[in-house]
Image (spheres, coloured by chain):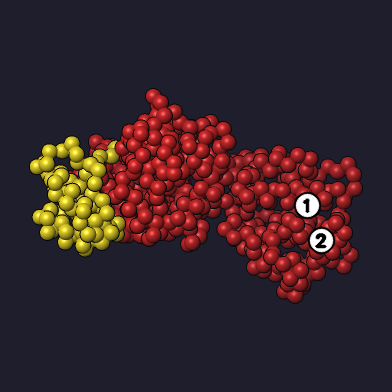
Chain colours: A red, B yellow
């Protein structure tokens, strides 16, 4: 794709075997189903003492199912048609809800330098894959780091250069963009999701948004939606900007690039707004079924003030009940000493977003949680040196919890697209559960940690793999498209 | 109601009214002669213009949970 870095790729070396990833609830039933539906005979590691299956598939079997890790290794001699049928079985998707779309099949392509016999290889493979899969599903292990994170494990893959699409540091840190190759992808774009950004409006003619579905309304008396401030256009750019900016010199800065944009102008061109305007904007977004509302706005809260605004809390509760998640900036008042989360982000039912810089430390200005159980920072986003769109068709860099907030909003749209169940409180839970913990930062500063985009184990089609087997069987080599 | 203490009783300002029963709150405002600026039905909120004295009476009315003076927000 034209917005991906080109990089030299070492020719993968395939073993000819195929790995099927998935953890059926009942392995015995699973292996029976494989035999019945696909015509393959699969041994189960449960049938071996200590589940030591050895390096090769047992005699008479097409493969072996490793029960503890939910991986099936299919022999290179397995019938290709049967393998294709196997890939269509839903049983492989069981037990991985929310993380996987259908069965996964990959050619075994890792090269191992073994000093001992093949049993060690398979044991090492089993243990390493087990740890890697568990880590990824638990959300605390990045596949790119998997090989380095497993001490003593065999090499998990060749040393392929990793190509990550050009993007802002924030999109990379949040894994909105991922390498073109690898076990995990980020396939969501926000399509079908409505994201309301309540701010200073939007440059509706910005070239990067040509052709996008945009609904706009102004709640500021006497001012049109057009953004003469720049703050709103910048925030919308981060949450919903394009996958590929028109200017090829500009890297990707937008997250939910296919989401519907609902641009509500609730702050004037001077950058301020009344509660009534903002609440009217929330009402508009909720009434129109927006799943995500991003509010990069706020007002300072005095130290010692432990309350929160009742109207915003009522609005946020009503929104959650109707499937709308509101995220808001924690505020920028801490440069001269720590200050509490601003209103309305200090409402318990509004997700408060703190800012971190490129080192993933709290930005010096970002407010902190002081008055538990409410007024906490719930999550953090990139908020220093953030590149995004500005009025006039250009781009600019801004810093603030305002910039962190649309990162969370855009990623929320990705989760919302991934599952219709992720709405309101469930969407909140998904965001915080998958955030990258930042152990060096107090939770009162960054909440659950740095927001992370959803990730899906990459599904590779079976059909293109078949020529590999034919080549190894001595047939003429097939040419890749 | 916690705010409005510093306002003169006869100054009319905007308040945000949080309602448990929007219709009842609207009736209460009407009976007090309070002008309703906006109604946010999806959220159960009203914005009204009132003096502090009338706002306090509205806060004690059926269907009303809270009455807060309207504040200002800024970009962050």
Give the image location of residue A178, x and y in percent.
57, 45
**Do residues under tags 1 and 2 come within 8 Å of each other at their CB atoms?**
yes
Q: Which SS class for mark 2?
A: helix
Give the image location of residue B16, x and y in percent.
23, 49
Gap in angstroms between the C-alphas marked 1 and 2: 11 Å
Give the image location of residue A212, x and y in percent.
37, 53
Q: Quadrant of residue A89?
A: bottom right
- In the picture of the structure, the residue carrying the numbered disc 1 is A126
Q: Is residue A419 above or below residue A294?
A: below
**Tags 1 and 2 on a common chain:** yes
Q: Around disc 2, counting alpha carbons within 10 Å, would you say few (fewer than 14), some (14 to 19), or many (20 or more)? A: some
Viewer-side residue, A467 vs A121: A121
Residue at horizontal 52 percent and vertical 35 percent from the top: A442
Q: Chain of mark 2?
A: A
Residue at horizontal 86 percent and vertical 48 percent from the top: A120
Q: Which SS class for mark 1?
A: helix
Q: Is residue A397 above or below residue A378?
A: above
Give the image location of residue A384, x and y in percent.
44, 32
Q: Is residue A134 above or below residue A273?
A: below
Residue at horizontal 56 percent and vertical 41 percent from the top: A437
The circle on residue A45 is: 2
Q: Quadrant of residue A233?
A: top left
Q: Quadrant of residue A74?
A: bottom right
Residue at horizontal 73 percent and vertical 56 percent from the top: A69
Q: Is residue A130 above or below residue A115?
A: below
User: In the visual, does A383 lie left or right of A453?
Assistant: left
Task: Indicate which disc, 1 or 2, sits on the residue closer to the N terminus.
Answer: 2
Q: Chain of mark 1?
A: A
């Amino acid at each position: 794709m034209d917005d991906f870095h080109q990089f030299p790729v070492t020719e993968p070396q395939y073993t000819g075997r195929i790995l099927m990833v998935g953890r059926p609830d009942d392995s015995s039933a699973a292996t029976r189903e494989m035999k019945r539906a696909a015509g393959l005979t699969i041994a189960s590691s449960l049938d071996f003492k200590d589940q030591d299956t050895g390096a090769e598939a047992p005699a008479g079997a097409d493969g072996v199912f490793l029960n503890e890790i939910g991986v099936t290794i299919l022999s290179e001699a397995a019938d290709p048609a049967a393998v294709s049928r196997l890939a269509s079985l839903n049983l492989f998707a069981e037990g991985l809800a929310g993380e996987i779309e259908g069965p996964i099949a990959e050619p075994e392509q890792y090269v191992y330098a073994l000093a001992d016999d093949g049993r060690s290889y398979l044991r090492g493979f089993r243990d390493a894959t087990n740890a890697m899969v568990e880590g990824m599903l638990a959300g605390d292990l990045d596949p790119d780091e998997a090989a380095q994170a497993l001490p003593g494990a065999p090499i998990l893959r060749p040393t392929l250069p990793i190509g990550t699409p050009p993007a802002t540091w924030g999109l990379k840190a949040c894994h909105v963009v991922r390498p073109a190759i690898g076990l995990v992808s980020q396939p969501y774009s926000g399509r079908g999701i409505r994201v309301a950004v309540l701010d200073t409006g939007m440059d509706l003619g910005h070239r990067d948004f040509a052709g996008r579905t945009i609904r706009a309304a102004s709640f500021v008396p006497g001012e049109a939606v057009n953004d003469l401030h720049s703050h709103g256009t910048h925030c919308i750019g981060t949450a919903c900007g394009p996958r590929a900016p028109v200017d090829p010199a500009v890297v990707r800065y937008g997250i939910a690039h296919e989401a519907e944009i609902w641009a509500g102008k609730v702050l004037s061109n001077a950058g301020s707004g009344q509660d009534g305007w903002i609440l009217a904007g929330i009402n508009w977004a909720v009434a129109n079924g927006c799943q995500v509302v991003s509010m990069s706005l706020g007002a300072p809260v005095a130290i010692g003030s432990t309350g929160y605004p009742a109207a915003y809390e009522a609005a946020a509760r009503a929104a959650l009940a109707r499937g709308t998640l509101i995220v808001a900036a924690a505020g920028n008042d801490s440069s001269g000493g720590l200050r509490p989360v601003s209103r309305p982000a200090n409402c318990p039912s509004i997700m408060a977003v703190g800012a971190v810089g490129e080192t993933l430390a709290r930005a010096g200005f970002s407010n902190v949680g002081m008055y538990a159980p409410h007024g906490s920072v719930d999550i953090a986003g990139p908020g220093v040196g953030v590149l995004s769109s500005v009025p006039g068709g250009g781009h600019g860099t801004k810093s603030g919890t305002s910039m962190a907030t649309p990162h969370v909003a855009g990623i929320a749209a990705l989760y919302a697209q991934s599952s219709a169940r992720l709405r309101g409180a469930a969407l909140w839970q998904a965001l915080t559960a998958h955030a990258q913990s930042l152990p060096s930062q107090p939770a009162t500063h960054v909440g659950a940690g740095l927001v992370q985009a959803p990730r899906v184990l990459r599904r590779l089609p079976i059909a293109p793999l078949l020529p590999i087997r034919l080549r190894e069987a001595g047939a003429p080599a097939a040419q890749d498209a | 109601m916690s705010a409005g203490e510093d306002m003169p009783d006869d100054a009319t300002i905007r308040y945000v009214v949080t309602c448990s029963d929007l219709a009842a709150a609207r009736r209460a405002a009407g009976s007090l002669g309070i002008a309703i600026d906006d109604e946010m039905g999806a959220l159960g909120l009203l914005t009204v213009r009132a003096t502090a004295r009338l706002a306090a009476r509205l806060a004690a009315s059926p269907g009303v949970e809270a009455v807060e003076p309207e504040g200002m927000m800024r970009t962050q």
